[in-house]
Structure formats: C-alpha cells, structure tokens
Amino acid sequence: MRVAIALMVEPIPPITLPPASNPAQEGEWLRAALWRWLNQEFIPEDANQQIAERAAQIFVRQRMEGENDLGALVMAIVTEMESFDFSNSFFGEFAVANAVIDLLLDSLGFDRCCGQ
C-alpha cells in the first residue's frame, strides 16, 4: 500500500536590492567581480572582459531606471545578452546571469541554498 505525503513548500520570496545610491560604482564592482569569476570558472579568455562589461552596462542601466528586483534584473541580463556573440566563449547568457545572481547574493550575505 502506498501512502502519499503532501509537502507544504513555501515559495522563496522575491529578493529586492536596496535602492541604488551609486549605480556606476555598483556596475564597476559587478564588472570586476564577474570578469574575475569568468576567468576563474574555466580559462581566461579575451571575450570574458567584453562579457563582463556588457553585463555590467545592462545592470547599471536597469538600476538607473529604478529596477531593484533581482529577478527582473537577471531577466534583463538574459534577454539583452542573447544578442551578444558568445562564439569565442565557454559561456552563454544564462551562465552569465546566474553568475551575476551568485555574485550579488554573496555580496548581500544571502545563503543561496535557502533564499535567506
């Protein structure tokens, strides 16, 4: 006889970044951190600098437009990075967006495992 067990799983609440006080400084931090991550994840490539710069530009523009929702920021990065030429890279737009999430969550002290 099988017994079904229903698990009550609470959704993870959206993560909202504090309002941007200096988007240019945030962008420079993100550019440097993402470039470092890209170089460490596989091998350093010339394309990594361009990828980091483009992702940081998107992030800064979104922040200057008042976007604070992490999910919306990541979707903007994925959407706009689709037009980037990743042919000289091991990465793609989803890997870049996921790295941005990880870097931002680490900087905010979030435990990525449990959303806290």
Image (cartoon, rainbow, N blue to C red):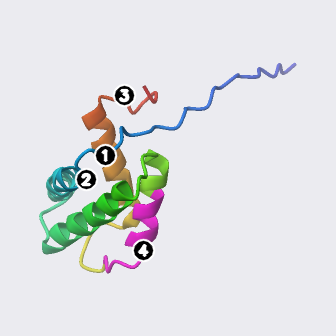
Secondary structure at numbered mark 4: loop
Camera-nearest label, 1 or 4: 1
Q: Which residue is mark 3?
A: 111
Q: Are marks 2 and 4 in contact (CB under 8 Å)?
A: no
Q: Which residue is mark 4?
A: 82
Is residue 7 placed above or below 86 in the rendered structure? above
Marks 4 and 3, Cα distance to the nearest angstrom?
28 Å
On the picture, is 7 further left or further right than 62?
right
Mark 3, other Cα within 10 Å: few <14 / some 14–19 / many ≥20: few
Residue situated in front as seen by the camera: 15 or 44: 15
Q: Disc 2 residue type? A: Pro
Q: Which residue is mark 2?
A: 23
Q: Which residue is mark 1?
A: 20
Query: Residue 84 appears at what percent x and percent y?
Result: 34, 77
Marks 1 and 4, Cα distance to the nearest angstrom?
25 Å
Q: Are marks 1 and 3 in contact (CB under 8 Å)?
A: no
Residue situated in front as seen by the camera: 90 or 75: 75
Marks 1 and 2, Cα distance to the nearest angstrom?
6 Å
Marks 3 and 2, Cα distance to the nearest angstrom?
24 Å
- What residue sits 65% from the left and 26% below the top? 9
Residue at the limit of the structure toward the right, as seen here: 1
